[in-house]
């Protein structure tokens, strides 16, 4: 699927809904930077040397890398700088970072759209940024050779110095830039032909250097979206309807709001992009007064078609759809599972469910909009600049080329800021009042209007032969389709049964690396949930629920055939056919996790157990091989205590070891939180949980020991932000079975469910 991100095609610029959503092509938005007034460029000063659009070297020798990815605490900007630094030969203390705007020059034909998700960033940028660094080193070397009158082949580059050992002559990067001798440019073919370092030559990659963004984030100079201040700026507070989507505003009585000091106007959103529905924004001179005015508004709604829906009704509809033989499209269609079930010695069936889950990043959603003549400036942290700019244009009713995105640091994203809903009230309020407007969501706004992880229902059926060998699996996945909601055809995948495109970001992971000769995966869109709870991508995306089902079912099959679940997995990871290579890497991570945890070698107390799971998240084509052993204790009451999580992950090439470990640890704890604690529910069309008193993520007191083993084997760098999220829940579920005999099939796992299964 990542190829689709890179190959999005241009669209004409009109103000249809398709234009807003599909016109976000990597090369399709001409955002009008050249010759437009009031545009701030991320480029360095004219005297600087800019060997690539992604970095520049100033006359003082400082190297500023522009990061085209959203930095939400995962230090991706610093990672990009580290990759460039390795090939460039710069001194780390000379490196700086900044965030890219939506200037068309950053719509790189190699790197594709400015989207941050899927654990793609390092994986998809490593080679291109390496080549950019190498090109700069060569250009500087040739410039220095010309200035010193020596052959370029005799020069050595290290720590921002270019040295000629024979003559002892040397020049710093700053000297070369000031000399103006660095002029060499490269064609795309020449860049591709550059010889890069091999892993044994690395001096920066694989080193835990100080992260470049930490000083500014600790001294307060780093600017997040919520920090934006503009001259003459006022504030907006949103009023959202009682249902998640589908409501319309019938009337607004602002008589009480007019008594609030500094109240300016109540703006009813007219959102042609259909991102929001039934929203009003109260505008005032301060945020506190904007909130007071919002609370004073009396708004009458038509609640719309989703007003009576609940989580149960969405689940009931999912089960109905799964029962229809002709529903959905096939994502995987290998062999004939139905025939294999007919001759199987044993058939195992199970249903797995997951709840609605909310992102809830620490920094609440916010955006600041300002019109300068015909140009709309948007200040916000977002994960999908090439789509968000078009959404903002749609909200303003202007051509996308007149939108300038100012990317800010993100106080958490996790997929939430792939959406641009926060920009719409800011844009329309700024247009209505003629002033810059900053809109800040309350926590309640964000939770009830989150583009959540969807409620899912999965039916899995497996068959084994007389020798206990797995011969068939059929897997139906029913959910809202978050990526289809974007309206970008290139993000959808043709179904193998030719019934039309499907949202593979709802079924990735179900196309596992186990060898099973007969294997069906059917993706079924729950239209009711799709409309009532517009869903988004939450950290781990589909593998967060598909591997919950797959890895739980593998354990259930092992139990039904009397096999050790870890050894059963190893037997399935034989690398046959299309699983060549990947299965072996996954097998190695499983063995590493087993060894580090002591799985199978310890005599555990009664009521305790270990469980395993191994996954190829995020997607088959962009996998990070990850395994987990969970150690749990189960009380007679059904209460589960997770004592330890042991995670092993194969990252290929590790850029920053400490950061990788931090990402894996954080992902594992996020997976634990989703597995045990987080649940949102829909009632009467609205999300019931409005703050952290009712939506309860993992608390520090509930945090177990986390042990991490990182396998760095010099292969292509993979992503680490999400895969460990996906492996934890099934490992815990399988550990609960081994500790108590209770089989849990719904997330989050509750004491009530565990106790009920123990009794059964």
Image: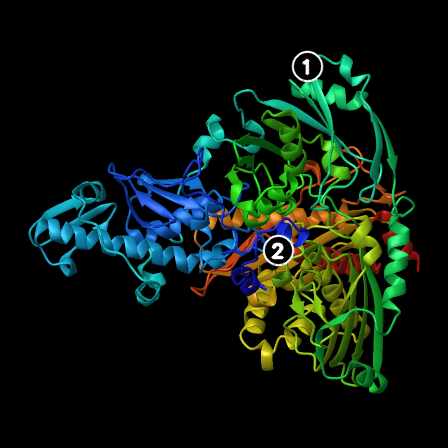
The residue that appears at 67% across and 68% down in the rendered structure is 566
Apparent side of residue 370 relative to residue 57 in the rendered image (left or right): right
Apparent side of residue 760 relative to residue 626 in the rendered image (left or right): right
Specify how the rendered protein is coloured: rainbow
Query: 747 or 143, which lies in front?
Result: 143
- The dot on residue 262 is 1
- The dot on residue 22 is 2
- The answer to whether 552 is drawn above or below residue 146 in the figure is below
Circle 1 SS class:
loop
Quarter of the rendering containing residue 64: top left
Q: Quadrant of the N terminus?
A: bottom right
Apparent side of residue 256 relative to residue 312 in the rendered image (left or right): left
Residues tagged 1 and 2 counted as in contact (Cβ below 8 A): no
Query: 229 or 460, which lies in front?
Result: 229
**3D distance between C-alphas at marks 1 and 2:** 39 Å
Query: 91 or 101, which lies in front?
Result: 101
């Amino acid at each position: 699927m990542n190829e689709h991100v890179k190959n999005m095609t241009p669209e004409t610029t009109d103000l249809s809904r398709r234009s807003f959503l599909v016109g976000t092509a990597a090369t399709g938005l001409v955002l009008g930077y050249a010759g437009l007034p009031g545009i701030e460029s991320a480029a360095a000063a004219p005297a600087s040397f800019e060997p690539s659009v992604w970095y520049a070297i100033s006359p003082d020798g400082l190297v500023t890398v522009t990061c085209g990815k959203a930095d939400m605490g995962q230090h991706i900007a610093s990672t990009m700088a580290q990759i460039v630094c390795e090939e460039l030969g710069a001194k780390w203390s000379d490196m700086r970072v900044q965030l890219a705007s939506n200037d068309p020059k950053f719509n790189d034909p190699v790197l594709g759209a400015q989207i941050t998700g899927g654990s793609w960033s390092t994986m998809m940028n490593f080679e291109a940024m390496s080549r950019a660094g190498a090109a700069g080193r060569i250009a500087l070397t040739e410039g220095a050779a010309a200035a010193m009158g020596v052959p370029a082949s005799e020069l050595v580059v290290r720590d921002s110095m270019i040295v000629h050992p024979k003559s002892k002559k040397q020049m710093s990067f700053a000297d070369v830039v000031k000399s103006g001798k660095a002029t060499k440019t490269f064609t795309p073919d020449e860049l591709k032909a550059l010889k890069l370092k091999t892993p044994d030559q690395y001096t920066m990659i694989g080193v835990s250097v100080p992260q470049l963004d930490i000083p500014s984030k600790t001294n307060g100079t780093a600017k997040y979206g919520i920090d934006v201040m503009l001259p003459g700026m006022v504030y907006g507070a949103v009023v959202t309807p009682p249902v998640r989507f589908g409501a319309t505003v019938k009337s607004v009585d602002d008589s009480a709001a007019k008594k609030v000091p500094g109240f300016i106007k109540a703006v009813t959103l007219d959102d042609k992009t259909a991102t929001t529905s039934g929203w009003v924004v109260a505008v005032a001179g301060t945020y506190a007064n904007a909130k007071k005015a919002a609370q004073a508004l009396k708004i009458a709604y038509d609640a719309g078609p989703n007003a009576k829906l609940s989580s149960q009704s969405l689940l009931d509809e999912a089960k109905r759809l799964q029962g229809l033989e002709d529903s959905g499209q096939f994502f995987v269609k290998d062999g004939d599972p139905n025939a294999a079930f007919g001759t199987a010695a044993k058939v195992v069936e199970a249903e797995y469910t997951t709840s609605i889950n909310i992102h809830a990043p620490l920094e609440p959603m916010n955006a600041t909009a300002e019109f300068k003549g015909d140009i709309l400036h948007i200040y916000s942290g977002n994960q999908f600049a090439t789509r968000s700019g078009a959404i903002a244009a749609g909200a303003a009713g202007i051509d996308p080329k007149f939108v300038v995105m100012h990317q800010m640091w993100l106080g958490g994203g996790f997929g939430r800021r792939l959406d641009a809903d926060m920009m719409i009230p800011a844009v329309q309020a700024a247009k209505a009042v003629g002033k810059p407007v900053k809109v800040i969501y309350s926590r309640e706004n964000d939770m009830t209007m989150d583009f959540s992880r969807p409620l899912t229902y999965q039916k899995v059926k497996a068959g084994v032969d007389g020798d206990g060998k797995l011969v068939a699996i059929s897997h139906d996945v029913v959910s809202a389709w978050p990526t289809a909601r974007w309206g970008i055809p290139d993000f959808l995948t043709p179904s193998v049964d030719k019934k039309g495109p499907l949202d593979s970001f709802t079924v990735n992971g179900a196309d596992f690396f186990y060898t099973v000769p007969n294997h069906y995966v059917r993706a079924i869109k729950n239209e009711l949930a799709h409309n009532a709870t517009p869903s988004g991508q939450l950290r781990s995306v589909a593998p967060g629920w598909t591997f919950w089902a797959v890895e739980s079912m593998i354990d259930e099959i092992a139990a039904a055939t009397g096999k050790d679940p870890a050894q059963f997995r190893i037997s399935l990871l034989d690398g046959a056919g299309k699983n060549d290579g990947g299965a072996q890497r996954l097998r190695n991570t499983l063995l590493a996790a087993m060894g580090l945890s002591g799985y199978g070698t310890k005599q555990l107390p009664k009521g305790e157990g270990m469980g395993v799971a191994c996954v190829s998240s995020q997607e088959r084509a962009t996998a990070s091989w990850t395994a987990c052993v969970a150690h749990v204790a189960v009380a007679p009451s059904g209460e589960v205590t997770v004592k330890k999580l042991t995670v092993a992950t194969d990252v290929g090439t590790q850029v920053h070891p400490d950061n990788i470990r931090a990402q894996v640890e954080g992902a594992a704890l996020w997976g634990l939180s989703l597995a045990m604690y987080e649940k949102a529910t829909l009632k009467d069309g609205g999300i019931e949980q409005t703050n952290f008193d009712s939506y309860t993520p993992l608390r520090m007191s509930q945090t177990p020991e986390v042990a991490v083993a990182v396998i760095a084997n010099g292969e292509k760098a993979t992503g680490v932000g999400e895969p460990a999220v996906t492996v934890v829940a099934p490992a815990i579920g399988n550990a609960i079975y081994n500790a108590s005999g209770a089989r849990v099939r719904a997330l989050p796992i509750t004491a009530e469910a565990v106790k009920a299964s123990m009794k059964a």
